[in-house]
């Protein structure tokens, strides 16, 4: 057991001394500190101008300017049209030529020519695929027509508007889980786990392959048990990744707390995660993390050069990306059959079951069954990885297919 701790300490320190580990940690933490400090910076340096603008007041909620020509003045009131236009400033032109020139020179966003109480022309410079400059005017144009019509009937428009657009209050009673409120922090945790496994899986595979390329693996195998070597490497990578993720979370929490007054509690829900959700993330996340790191380590032992690592781990990487996609898609419908099935498959259960616990409804029995399957599979995977690691010391040259390795394993006396 002493050798295991020696290998674990050695691998862990290698990660901590790695420039990529240090630089990525500094950059991510720096970005989080800056991002969380943006409201404080705005309040400190720009609050005066905002208050001044509020005191002076703005006639329109938007600084965009639009033009219009009223060729139906007898039936369409220009002042009413301008007062109910809420998409910006609506400027009246005397002739169409001057308005079109303003549109061409981009002095105004678009122009409108009113031809009758229910018809108008939309004047734009370019017809963009996602153009929507007419929506605000059309809404104001319709309201102007309604006001004129009700006025002709002797009816107050405000009374009709209150009936047509009556404010409806809704109180939602949640009997299960508030999936909408939990979506954001669930996605952040799932993506964080995805990022850590991808990065550290590649690093573990590369570390194993580099030892094999410089013949260090042969010396290590003769010095201690292969179980200690592969488990030390995997657990070293797991601790490095977990500590980096913990550092990022702590920095984010600290930066948010330091700027909490400026945020006015808007992100409290991100840092107020229920203990049951955190517990399931810790247990399923760690087991899934170890499961994939064992796979990456075993695949790294099948190549003789570090250049071949990416090719060797491609199949498991594709599977892992598919697992992430299934989990993210399943967040849209936690009661869907796809996510339920994925929560019992070892390759995907560590993400899928966590999503169901965080955002859906799941029984303790289902959680226990999924956890038991994942725990047993992780143990078996670690045991097989140690056998493949030892067998890899005898395989040099081209990358070895995994099917050939399993044939050799089951035909030998070690299994």
Image (spheres, rainbow, N blue to C red):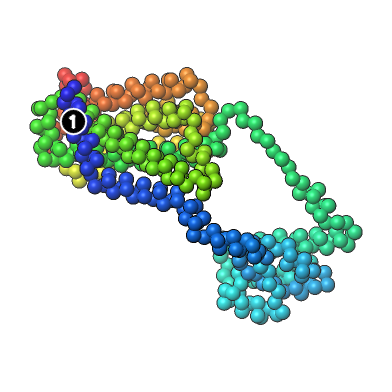
Local SS, label 1: helix
Query: As rendered, which of 409 and 214 lies closer to the eye?
Result: 214
Query: As rendered, which of 30 and 172 lies closer to the eye?
Result: 30
State left or right for residue 121 relative to residue 162: left
The C terminus, quarter of image: top left
The quadrant where residue 369 appears: top left
Q: x, y (%) of residue 204?
A: 24, 37
Which residue is denoted by mark 1 in the rendering?
A: 7
Give the residue drawn at x 47%, y 27%.
276
Give the residue drawn at x 32%, y 39%.
244
Query: As rendered, which of 3 and 94 lies closer to the eye?
Result: 3
The N terminus, quarter of image: top left
The quadrant where residue 47 appears: bottom right
Residue 395 in view here? yes
Farthest residue in the right direction? 154
The quadrant where residue 79 appears: bottom right
Q: x, y (%) of residue 39?
A: 49, 52
Q: x, y (%) of residue 167?
A: 74, 45
Give the residue drawn at x 37%, y 42%.
248
Q: In the figure, 362 relative to 40: above or below?
A: above
> Label 1 crowding class (10 Å Cα cut-off): few <14, some 14-19, many 20+?
many
Q: x, y (%) of residue 52?
A: 60, 63
State left or right for residue 213 relative to residue 355: left
Residue 349 in view here? no
Give the residue drawn at x 51%, y 22%.
363
State left or right for residue 44 relative to residue 236: right
């Amino acid at each position: 057991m002493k050798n295991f701790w020696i290998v674990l300490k050695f691998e862990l320190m290698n990660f901590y001394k790695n420039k990529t580990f240090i630089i990525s940690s500094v950059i991510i933490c720096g970005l989080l500190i800056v991002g969380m400090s943006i409201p404080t910076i705005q309040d400190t340096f720009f609050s005066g101008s905002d208050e001044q603008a509020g005191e002076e007041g703005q006639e329109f909620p938007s600084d965009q300017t639009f033009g219009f020509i009223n060729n139906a003045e007898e039936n369409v009131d220009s002042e009413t049209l301008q007062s109910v236009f809420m998409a910006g400033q609506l400027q009246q032109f005397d002739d169409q030529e001057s308005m079109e020139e303003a549109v061409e020179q981009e002095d105004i966003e678009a122009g409108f020519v009113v031809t009758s109480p229910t018809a108008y022309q939309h004047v734009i410079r370019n017809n963009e695929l996602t153009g929507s400059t007419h929506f605000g005017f059309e809404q104001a144009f319709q309201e102007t027509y309604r006001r004129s019509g009700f006025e002709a009937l002797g009816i107050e428009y405000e009374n009709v508007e209150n009936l047509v657009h009556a404010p409806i209050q809704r109180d939602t009673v949640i009997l299960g889980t508030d999936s909408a409120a939990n979506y954001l922090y669930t996605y952040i945790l799932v993506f964080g786990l995805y990022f850590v496994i991808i990065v550290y899986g590649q690093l573990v595979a590369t570390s194993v392959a580099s030892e094999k390329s410089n013949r260090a693996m042969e010396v290590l195998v003769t010095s201690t048990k292969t179980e200690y070597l592969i488990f030390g490497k995997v657990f070293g990578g797991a601790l490095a990744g977990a500590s980096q993720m913990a550092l990022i979370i702590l920095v984010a929490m600290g930066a948010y707390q330091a700027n909490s007054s400026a945020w006015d509690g808007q992100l409290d829900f991100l840092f107020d995660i229920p203990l049951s959700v955190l517990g399931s993330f810790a247990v399923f996340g760690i087991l899934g993390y170890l499961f994939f790191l064992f796979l990456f380590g075993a695949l790294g032992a099948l190549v003789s050069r570090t250049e071949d690592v990416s090719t060797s781990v491609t199949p498991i990487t594709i599977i892992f990306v598919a697992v992430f996609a299934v989990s993210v898609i399943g967040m849209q419908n936690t009661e869907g059959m796809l996510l339920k099935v994925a929560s019992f498959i070892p390759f995907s259960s560590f993400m899928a079951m966590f999503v169901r616990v965080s955002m859906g409804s799941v029984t303790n029995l289902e959680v226990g069954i999924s956890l038991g399957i994942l725990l047993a599979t992780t143990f078996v995977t670690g045991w097989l990885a140690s056998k493949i690691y030892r067998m890899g010391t005898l395989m040099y040259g081209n990358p070895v297919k995994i099917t050939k390795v399993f044939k050799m394993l089951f035909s030998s006396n070690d299994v």
